[in-house]
Amino acid sequence: MSTPNEPPKTTLALRAPGNTGLQVSEVALGTWGIGAGAYGPVTTAQFEDTVRAAWDAGITTFDVSPSWGDGIAEKRLGLALGEDLNKATLVVRAGQMMSEGRLQGHF
């Protein structure tokens, strides 16, 4: 796997959504399952290995939300990408938070 500051070893096609001028990888890595533990516990090392493998495969777009694992997904993604974070595109979600064990709108 790559280390921070190395370019991805393979490259996926990039696309520009609308007229934003952004270039995003055609495939994104969603972090709900590994950030919120939706399919069972995920260690920090497993999360980081998954993100680095995605980066190596050319994925530069990551889907993350503060409500996934109560911010764990965002924190771990930042750690895993390290200095590559400034080259990544993050699809972020806002307006929901956990309160009393329930996901609630907070707009």
Image (cartoon, helix red, strand yellow):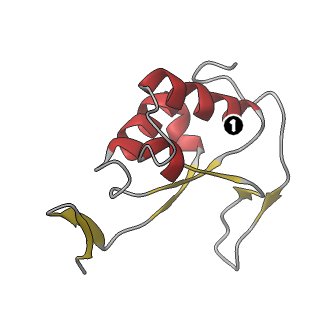
In this view, the residue in front, 96 or 24, is: 96
Which residue is denoted by mark 1 in the rendering? Answer: 54
Residue 89 located left or right of residue 2: left
Residue for point 70% across, 19% down = 1
Where does residue 33 sit, x and y in percent of width and height? 52, 48
Which class describes the residues within 10 Å of circle 1: few (<14), some (14-19), or many (20+)?
many
80 vs 27: above or below: above
Residue for point 75% across, 54% down = 27
In this view, the residue in front, 46 or 100, is: 100
25 vs 4: above or below: below
Query: Farthest residue toward the front?
Result: 40
In this view, the residue in front, 7 or 33, is: 33
Where does residue 72 sit, x and y in percent of width and height? 34, 42
4 vs 90: above or below: above
Residue for point 46% across, 32% down = 42
**SS at badge 1:** helix
Residue for point 69% across, 79% down = 19
Identify which amino acid the numbered label 1 is placed on: Ala
Where does residue 74 sit, x and y in percent of width and height? 39, 45
